[in-house]
Amino acid sequence: MTVAIILALATVYFGTSKLGFTMAFAAEQVTLVWPPTGISLAAVLLLGYRVWPGIALGAFLANVTAHEPVATACGIAIGNTLEALSGVWMLHRLAGFDNHISRLKDVLALVFLSAFVSTAISATIGVMSLCIGGVQPWTAYGYLWLLWWLGDLGGALIIAPMLLVWGSGPFNLPSAPNIREALILATLLLLACLSIFTGQITAGIRGDAFIYVVFPFIIWAALRFGQHGTTFVSMTASAIAIWATLHGLGPFTATSVEQSLMLLQIFMAVVTTTGLFLGTAITERKQASEARALLAAIVEFSEDAIISETLDGVITSWNRRAEHMFGHTAAEAIGRPITIIIPPERHEEETHILNRLRNKEHIEHYETVRMTVDGRKLDVSLTISPILGAQGRIIGASKVIRDITERKRTDKALREADRRKDEFLALLAHELRNPLGALQNALYIMQTPNAGDAKRSGALEIMARQLQQITRLVDDLLDVSRISNGKIELRRERIQLARIIDNALETVKPLMEARMHRLTIHLPESAVWFDADPVRLSQVFANLLQNAAKYTPPGGKIRLTAETDGQTAQIHVRDTGIGIPTVMLSKIFELFTQVDNSMERTQGGMGIGLTLVKTLVEMHHGSVEVQSKGMNQGSEFVVRLPQVMPPQITEVLTPALGMQEADSTSRRLRILVVDDSEALAQTLGYMAELLGHEVRVAHNGEDALTIARSFLPEVVLLDLGLPGMNGFDVCRKLRTDPALRHSTIIAQSGWGQPEYRERSKESGFDYHLVKPVKIEQLEELFSSLA
C-alpha cells in the first residue's frame, strides 16, 4: 500500500511539474506557476513523512526530462523534497499545526513557515544546482531565484490549503439550501472571474479596480462555507486568472508574460492569505459561539441550580433548575439581591463568601441553608467560583447550588437507625443478662447441699422460665432476620379466631396472673374463620397481649374484643397502661423502636415485637393501627383481617413429625449424640438416658463415624455445624455403610430455614429439629421409633 501511494504521488508530482514547465518563460526549468509545492506539502501533512520518496522520484523525473544533467536533476529533487519535509517539520514542531487550518495560528504558520521560509530552501538549492550544472548562468541567479520562490509560494498558499481542508475530513454533506447557495456562489464567481480576467467588462476602462470584485466572493465563501469555501474560491479565481493572463487578457497584462504572472501571483497570494485569515476568523468565531451555546445549554439544563451575581450581590443569571428549586422565575430573580433566597439569619454568611471571593478563593461543597419563594428551607451544597473580567479582575461570582435536603434527611435517618441499633444492642445485653443471671443463681441453689427440696424445686421452675424467655428472644430475632430477607413462609389453613386467641393466651396468661390484670374477652357469637398460619397469627396476638401486660400497671385492665361485617374482622386490644406519646404513634411499628427505654420505666423487650406484628398481619393481607391519647392514657391496637367461609369438611390433623402416639411399652434404643458443644451433647445424652435409652457421645465427624461402626446406633442425633467434616458429610458417609443404612438420622441445628431443611433431606436425614430441642419432642420421637 505504501509503495502504491509513493508511485501515485510521484506520478501526480511529475504530471503537475510538466504542467508548470509549460509556463516557464525566463528559463525552461523555472516557472511562476508550480503546483507540486502545494501537492508535496499537503501529501506529507496528510500521509506522513513516509511518502518523501514519491516527492523525490517525481521531482527527479520531471527535471531529468527537462534537458538537465542527472546531477542537476538530483540536486533539484533534493531541494524540492527538503522543501516539503522542512515545511512540515516546522509546522508541527513550532506551531502544532492542524490540517483543518481552523485556527489563526495555523494560517500564520502556513504563510510564514511554509510559504515564505521552506520555499526559500527549494529556490536556493534548485537555482544553485542549475548554475553549478551550467544550465543557467550565475548572473541570472537572483532573478531566477525570485521567480522560483514566487512559483513555490503560490503553490504553498493556493494548492496546499485546498488539499488539506478538503482532504482532512470529516466533511458533512450540506443541506439542500446550502447546495443551492454553493451552486449560485460558484456560478457567479465563474462569471465574475471570466469577465474580470478576460477583460470583457473592462474594455476601454482601467480594469485595476475590478480585480477587487474577487474579495466579496472570498467574504461570502468564508461566512457561509468556512475554509472549504475560501480555498475553493481562491483556487477557481487563480486558475481562471492564470489562463487569462497566459493568453494576454485581463488586468495583469504587462510587457512580458513573466511580469504579468509575477503581478498575478502576488495578487493571488494576497487574496488567498486574506481568505484564509477571514475563513479562520469566521470558523473560530463560530466555534466560540457554539461553545458558548453549548455551555449555556449545559447551564440551563443542569440538574443543579446555577446562579451568577455581582460583587454587590445582585443576581445576573438564573437557570431553569434555580427556577424549579427556589420558585422564582428568571425574570423575577435577575436584577434582585441574592438575599431573596437566603434566610435572614444567614445574610452575614453571604458577606463572608463575597469577601473570600475577592481574595480569589474557590469555595467547594459549602453546606448551608437556602430559602424558597414560599419560605421553605432547603439544605444545599454550594460551589462558588469567581468570575473574571477582560482585565483579569474579579467582577462577580458563579454559584452552583445542589439540593441536599434528601441526602440530609437520609443521613439523619441513618444516624437515627444507628442510634436505635446501639440502643437495641444495649437492650439485648440487658434482656439476656437478666435470664442468664437468674439461671446462674438457680444453678448455685441446685449445687448447694443444704438448699432443701422446696428451694431446688423453685430453682428448677426459674430455670425453665428463663430458658423459655431466652428461646423466645432468639426466635424473635430469627423472625426479624427472615422477614428482612423475605424468607418467612406462611403455612395457611382454615382456622377460627377463637382458637388463635386461645393459643395466644397460653403464652401470656402467666404474666397477666402474676401482675393481677383483669382480662376481658368478647368475641362474636358466630365463628370467625381465617385462611391463615395458626402459629404466626397466634404470635401476633400473643405479642399484642404481652405488650399490654408489660406496660399496664399491676391491677390494670386489658380488654380484647372482636367484631365483623362478614368480610373483615376487627380485633381490638385495649389496655389502661402507660400509653404512647403522639409523636411516637407513627414510629411505633419501626424496628428497634421503644416508647420509653429509660432505666426507670423499662419493662424489657427489644423493640422488635410490633415490627413482627405489622409484617405478619400484612402478610395475611390485613392491617394494624395504634391509637393512644398520650402518656398514662392507655393504648389500643386494631388488627383488621379478611375473613373466609368456614370449611365444608372436617380436616384431619396429623401428629407432629408424622409420628404415632407413644407406646408405653417402647423398647430401649441405641442412640448416638454428635455435637461439637460438649455441654449440649452431654445434656442431650443425659436426657436420652433418663428416657431409658443407651447413649454414646461424639464431638466431631471422625469420632462419630468410628463410634457408629462399633456401636451400630439405631438413632443418630447429628449436629450440622461440626468442625472439619460437617453434619451433611457425616450423614452421607453413614448412609454408605450397609450396617447403618437403616438407622434413623436426625439433624439438630440452629438453622431452621427451608433451604437447610431441604439440604438435610437431600443428604439423607430423616428429621430436622431446630435447637434448642425440647425433651417432649425427643420423648415423642424416640417413643415412635421404638
Image (cartoon, grey):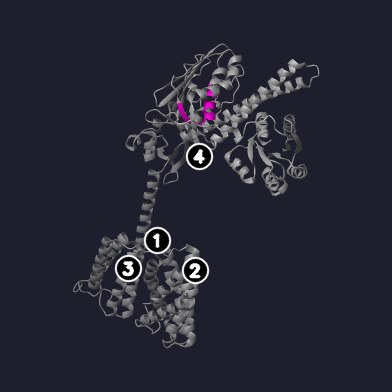
C-alpha distance separating marks 2 and 4:
45 Å
Residue 60 picture location, percent across and down: 46, 83
User: In the structure shown, which secondary structural element does the residue marked by tag 4 occupy?
Assistant: strand
Q: Mark 1 belongs to which amino acid?
A: Ser
First in sequence: mark 1 vs mark 2: 2
Residue indicated by mark 1 = 102
Give the number of the mark in front: 1 or 2.
1
Comparing 376 with 709, the one in front is 709
C-alpha distance separating marks 3 and 2:
26 Å
First in sequence: mark 3 vs mark 4: 3
Residue 713 picture location, percent across and down: 73, 40
Q: Mark 3 belongs to which amino acid?
A: Phe
Residue indicated by mark 3 = 232
Q: Mark 4 belongs to which amino acid?
A: Glu
Residue indicated by mark 2 = 89
Give the number of the mark in front: 3 or 4.
4
C-alpha distance separating marks 3 and 1:
16 Å
Marks 2 and 4 in Cβ contact (< 8 Å): no
Q: Which residues are magenta?
A: 529-544
Q: Is residue 192 above or below residue 640?
A: below
Q: Residue at x 38, y 46 (%)?
A: 296
Residue 582 picture location, percent across and down: 47, 20
User: In the structure shown, which secondary structural element does the residue marked by tag 3 occupy?
Assistant: helix
First in sequence: mark 1 vs mark 4: 1
Asked whether the viewer can see residue 499, the reply is yes
Q: Is residue 264 left or right of residue 12?
A: left
Residue indicated by mark 4 = 364
Pointer 4 local density, CA inside 10 Å: few below 14, some 14–19, many at least 20: few
Q: Residue at x 22, y 74 (%)?
A: 199
Q: Mark 2 belongs to which amino acid?
A: Trp
First in sequence: mark 2 vs mark 4: 2
